[in-house]
Amino acid sequence: MEGRQAKERERDPRKRERAELSAACLGRELRVPLRNPSRMLWVFAVLLVLGFALGLSVGITRGDRIGLGLAAFGVVLLACGIYAGVLARRFGARQDLAIVLGLRTLTVPALPLVRGGTVEIAYEELEDVTLLPSGNRLVHVLRTSDGLVPLLLDRLPRTQKNTKLPLRIHVRAALARRRPRLTAARLAAVEAQLLHEGPSIGALVTTKDGEPEVLSVLRDEAHLGAWLLSGELPADYEMICAQDVLDPLGDALRDAIGAMVDVGGSAVAAKQTSAADGER
């Protein structure tokens, strides 16, 4: 009985890790929806309409020149409220407000957001992911042969803040220019070990419905042994060692200074990035 409970306790962390790795869409298309301003705009619209009603009622009650001015101001608020409602409805109908990391292309929303539309960038045309000052903070920008494209990471939901999107974009772009191309399974292993915090000796990868699925990032040989003895490995699994992952990257990862700065990172990280740019 105790042995069965111990096996169950060992199995739970493996299931949890596998679920987290599967949700990260490693080696597959990743769609990260951005925060839609529709709800906030509806709130503004309601408040502005209430302001119109209040201004109109006070203006009618007073009946003097001040009351007339309040009523006129209420009409202005109503016009603003109607405009906010139109914007809220337009944003609410949008389905493309997301960053999509494909295997060959990257798709980001076009600016200004109110006009709609997206920008699709082939990874071969993406030179790098860099940080540029904007006001009193640094923002991530995609540098392409046609110019700069903002990466709207400030609109990421809170649950997606630590997905390391800039780093994943940089690595996919660097690997897309290599020949021969990496298989989807090896790309999944690359991303899994880059996102893993701590040392690793490799990753266990399998194929499900034609797409790669990372089972686990192996911390050490004991971790590998636990998987081998668990009986949970599928017949077509593949172990991709750390060296197999690092070699295809070459110098690309070391050049990804801007990409490795976390979203909302500290001022220290920003200063280190600026210093590194200055040395170049």
Image (cartoon, grey):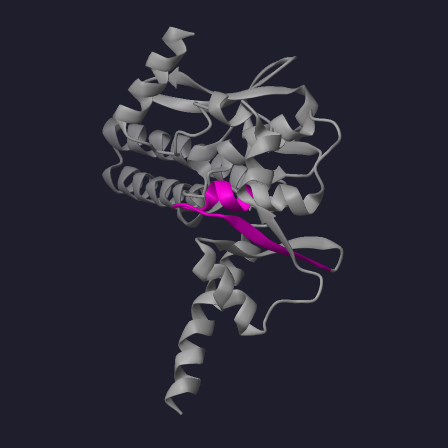
Spot occupied by residue 134 in the image (x, y as percentages of width and height): 38, 18
Spot occupied by residue 126 in the image (x, y as percentages of width and height): 63, 21
Residue name at image x 44 percent, y 79 percent? 8
* Quadrant containing the C terminus in the rendered view: top left
* Quarter of the view holding residue 168: top right
User: Can residue 114 be seen in the rendering of this structure?
Assistant: no
Tell me where the magenta segment starts and ends, as one range: 191-208
User: Can residue 254 be seen in the rendering of this structure?
Assistant: yes
* Nearer-the-camera pick, 187 or 223: 223
* Quarter of the view holding residue 47: top left
Residue name at image x 41 percent, y 43 percent? 162
Q: Is residue 70 left or right of residue 116?
A: left
Spot occupied by residue 269 in the image (x, y as percentages of width and height): 31, 26
* Nearer-the-camera pick, 71 or 79: 79
* Quadrant containing the N terminus in the rendered view: bottom left
* Nearer-the-camera pick, 82 or 209: 209
Q: Is residue 65 left or right of residue 199?
A: left
Q: Is residue 195 magenta?
A: yes
Tally of numbered tags? 0
Q: Is residue 205 magenta?
A: yes
Q: Is residue 274 left or right of residue 152?
A: left
Spot occupied by residue 113 in the image (x, y as percentages of width and height): 55, 30
Q: Residue furthest bottom?
A: 1
Residue name at image x 36 percent, y 30 percent? 72
Q: Is residue 13 left or right of residue 26?
A: left
* Nearer-the-camera pick, 20 or 263: 20
